[in-house]
Image (tube, rainbow, N blue to C red):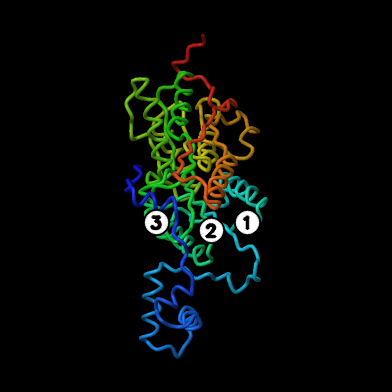
Amino acid sequence: MMTGRVNRKERATIAKPLQRATMRDVAALADVSIKTVSRVINGERYISENISQRVNEAIQRLNYRHNLAASQLRAGANSSAVGVILVDISNPFSAAVHRAVEDVFRETGVAVFLASTDEESDRERAAVHAFSKRRVDGLVIMPASHDQGYLRTEMAAGTHVVIIDRPPAFLNVDSVVSENRKGAKIGVDHLLRHGHRRIGFVGDWPTVASSQLRLAGYEDALTGANIELDPTIVLQGFPDAVAVQSATEKMLAADPAITALFVAQNALCSPAMRAVFALGKRKEIAIVGFDGFDGADLIEPGLTVIAQDPALIGKTAAELLLKRMNGENPEPSAQTLRTHLIIRGSGEIAGPFFENR
């Protein structure tokens, strides 16, 4: 997914966020008292339509974000907070990212709020809006949306943003991702070296940027081996684990020539392996996963994986965000973290073209 271009003026805005508008600023622009602004914001009755309109127009012009937490804070108390928005907080990958962000900010006394999106862009925007109303200083976002340009409004209002796991789209902003395409190529190359030529692909939703990159890495490896991509053995996008297992079983049953699978997302690995085991091909079909699951090293054979480091992703993102909050890092930083191959047995099952040298 391509990152949208931004002009020089826009980059300057990103690098130096504007001062956040206050209720006093709104009151001055609307020519009313601060108490009147508060009454309009809180939806109190007996406010004239004219005054309500003036206040709301001032709010829009100043991009004012009401601080819901302000009334709960004592004078002089530390009100710093950041929001973390992840796709699925039950996923061990997301949990490790969240824990790492918390560990960094715990040392600074900054509170960390958490929300999940379940791959729904509307929920992502709702979470951003909810955190902005609470005047968080920064956001770490694993995007479900395919265009993060809407975040420019929040950034202009003073909210710092770091995008993780998936490359930012149409927004020039700090980001931390893994080498998705290269990592996938390494995994498929490993299967090719072990004599496999008919390699199925089991991946996440095709609209997800990281899924697109991992499919591209799969195709890169096949191209390097002079193998044409066959879309009939590429499975993508599943509502649940049952659907993953069912689709994988059907593909393997329909095409006995498949001798290996590349599973491009950690949550898909377990159901894909169940499909292989259910067909009685535990020691016949090789599997490499992009990340695995807890206990993947304890089964027989253990799952060979291309491993990311979610804790390092979270730590790196939190440190970037902290620097932004401290006024450092004038230019957005794009960090790509390495992946590495962990050999456990499933990816080393020999294929029909294996040459033991």
Residue closest to the eye, 123 or 271: 123
Quick one: which residue is furthest to the top in this view? Answer: 357
Tag shown at residue 270: none
Discs 2, 1 touching: Cβ within 8 Å: yes
User: Is disc 2 placed on a helix, strand or loop?
Assistant: loop
Where residue 169 sits in the image (x, y, percent)?
Answer: 37, 47
Residue type, label 3: Arg
| 230 w.r.t. 102: above or below | above
Residue closest to the eye, 188 or 97: 97
Discs 3, 2 touching: Cβ within 8 Å: no
Residue type, label 1: Val
- Tell me if mark 3 has few (under 14), some (14-19) or many (20+) residues whose alpha carbon lies within 10 angstroms of its own: many
Residue type, label 2: Asp
Kindly identify which residue carries mark 1.
110
* Side of 13 relative to 321 (left or right): left
Among the two numbered marks 1 and 3 on one chain, the one whose residue lies closer to the N terminus: 1
Kindly identify which residue carries mark 3.
152
Residue closest to the eye, 228 or 123: 123
Quick one: which residue is furthest to the bottom in this view? Answer: 46
Query: How far apart are the two marked residues, 1 and 3, measured between alpha carbons?
Result: 23 Å
Kindly identify which residue carries mark 2.
137
Residue closest to the eye, 253 or 97: 97
User: Is disc 3 placed on a helix, strand or loop?
Assistant: helix
Among the two numbered marks 2 and 1 on one chain, the one whose residue lies closer to the N terminus: 1
Query: How far apart are the two marked residues, 3 and 2, measured between alpha carbons?
Result: 14 Å
